[in-house]
Amino acid sequence: MKSQSILRAASKTLAAATAALMLGTAAVPSAVAQTQAPANTKAAPAANGPASVADLAEGLLGAVVNISTSQTVKGSEGPGAVPMPQLPEGSPFQDFFDDFFKDRGGQKGGGAQKVQSLGSGFVVDAVEGIVVTNNHVIADADDIEVNFSDGVTLKAKLVGTDTKTDIAVLKVDPKGHKLTAVKFGDSNKMRIGDWVMAIGNPFGLGGTVTVGIVSARNRDINSGPYDDFIQTDAAINRGNSGGPLFNMNGEVIGINTAIISPSGGSIGIGFSIPSQLAAGVVDQLRQFGETRRGWLGVRIQPVTKDIAESLGMAEPKGALVAGIIKGGPVDNGSIQAGDVITKFDGKDIEETRDLPRVVAESPVGKAVDVIIIRKGKEQTVKVTLGRLEDGEKLADAEGKGEPGKDGTAAPVAAAKVLGMSIGELNDDTRGKFGIAADVSGVVVTEVAKDSAAAERGIQPGEVITEIGQESVATPKDVVDRIASLKQQGRKNALLMLASKTGELRFVTVRMD
C-alpha cells in the first residue's frame, strides 16, 4: 500500500544509505490507578489485565541486551554520492540530517567510513553465554558488542545465522559478566487477547518495557518462506529488532522483528517470530552453526476453487504438487505431480504456505506419513525426508535445462482449443521456443487475445503435459480430452503446464 510499509525494527545509520530516519520518543503512557468504587454503586469487575507488571519486568530486564555493531564501508563521494534529502520546512528530522551530512563535501572519494547499527537481543544460556537476536541486526557487521542493562559491554562472536527466519545466535564470554537467562515458552498456547510484554532498545534509548496483547496469529507479511508471525500492539520501534516478546510467565514466546508503519514509528502493528519456530532454529544454529531443515522435494502451488472443482474436491485446501525435483526424496513416484497434500506427519495442511513450514521443522531423515488426494481418492504414503540445504542445490541445477537442438522436421500437426493454437512438440518447435529436451507434451504456439487461456496467463512456448490429470502427447489428445471433460459436465479444464526448462504449474481454463 502507498501509505504503509513493512519496516525492520532495527535502527540503522548507514553512510552510504539513500536516506536515514530518526524518530522522536513516543509519549509515555500514564499509569493506570485503581480506585475504590463509591459505596452506593456496584463494584467494578476485576480487570482482566495485570494492574502492574513491575515485578515481572524487574526480573527480565537483566536478560535483555542491546546489540551494537559496526561495519567499515567505502566512502562514496563524487557523482555517486548520497545527496542531502530535501525536507519540509520545520521537519523534526532536520537536525539529524544536518549532523549526518555536515562536512561531507570536504571528504575525499573512496575514504573508508564506520557505520553503526543498534538492535536488541536476549540471553538464553547463561552458562555458555548464548545470545539470540535478528539476523538483520548483525548482517555484514565487522564487530558486534553486547551491552547489558548495568552498563557492562562484551564482545560477541557470531555462532550462526538463518536468513529465512531472520534469526542469529551470538556468543559472549560468560566469565566476563554474570549473565541472566530467559527461556522459550510455547507460542502455540498464546491466544488472541493474551497479554504480552516487549523489552528492547528502541532508538538506542536502552532497556525499554512496553505492554500489549496478542492482536493476531499466523500472520504472513511476505518476508520469508516460513512467515507465521505473532502480531502485537505492544509498542515496537526501530531498535527493538531481536528483542524478546514475553508472556505473563516471563517466557519468550516471540522475537520482535518487524513493524507496519507509514512513519517509521509504532502504530500498534508489530510482528514477532513465534517461539515454536525460533527455538528449533536457535538449537540448530547452536549445534551446527547452520540450519538443517527437512525437505520433501516438491514444487507446490495453491489449491484454488477452480482447481478443487476440477479435482473433485469438496473444498479448496491443501498444497497442490506442481512438480517433483529430480533426485529428491519423492522422486521414486511416492508423490506425483497433481497430488494434493492435505496432511503431513499428522499436521493438517490447510493452505499452501503451511507445508514448507511443517516440513522444514521436521528432522532430516525422518520417515513421515503424508496424506494425499490423487485423482479424487485419498491415500497415505510414507516418505523419508531429505535435507533442504542439499535440495536447494539440486533445484538450482534442475532449473538450468538445456534447450533442444534445431531440426528440420516436417510441418507439425496443429489444432485450436480454449483460445490456444497447439502443435506437436518435436525438434522444430523445441528449437523455435527453446524448449528443453526432457520436456514432453503438446506445445502452445499462439494464444488469442482475451481468450480463456490468455486470462490464465498461458504463453506461447509453454507445454501442456496433462489435462485433467491425464497425460497428452499430441494435439488430438488435447482435443479429445477437452471433449471428454465437457461430456462429464466439467466447467473448467485442469491443465498441467511445463515451462521451457521443465518447471511445472497448474492452471484451470474455462471451457465455454
Image: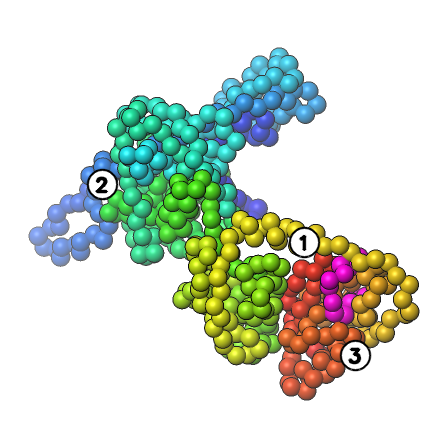
Residue 233, given in percent of the width and then of the height, sits at 37, 47
In the rendered view, does 408 fall on the left or right side of 307?
Answer: right
The location of residue 148, given as percent across then percent down, is 32, 28
Q: Which residue is mark 3?
A: 476
Determine whether 460 is above or below 47 in the image: below
What crowding class fits label 2: few (fewer than 14 Cα within 10 Å), some (14-19), or many (20 or more)?
Answer: some
The crowd level at tag 3 (other Cα within 10 Å; few <14, some 14-19, many 20+) is some
Sequence order check: which comes first, mark 1 or mark 2? 2
- Residue shown at the point (71%, 80%) measured from the top left: 481
Q: Is residue 290 above or below residue 400?
A: above
Residue 107 is left or right of residue 414, and the answer is: left
Mark 2: which amino acid? Leu
Can you give x and y, in whole percent of width and height, for residue 462 in the image? 74, 63
Residue that badge 2 annotates: 56
Q: Is residue 392 visible?
A: yes
Could you tell me if the residues under marks 1 and 3 are in contact, i.e. CB atoms within 8 Å?
A: no
Please state if 78 lies on the left or on the right of 85 as rendered: right
Q: Is residue 141 above or below residue 344?
A: above
Magenta segment includes 445: yes
The answer for how far apart the CA atoms under marks 1 and 3 are is: 30 Å
The magenta segment: 434-448
- The residue wearing badge 1 is 399
Q: Earlier in the sequence, mark 1 or mark 3?
A: 1
Q: Nearer the viewer, mark 1 or mark 3?
A: 1
Image quadrant of residue 420?
Answer: bottom right
Which badge, 3 or 2, comes first in the chain's sequence?
2
| Quadrant housing the C terminus | bottom right
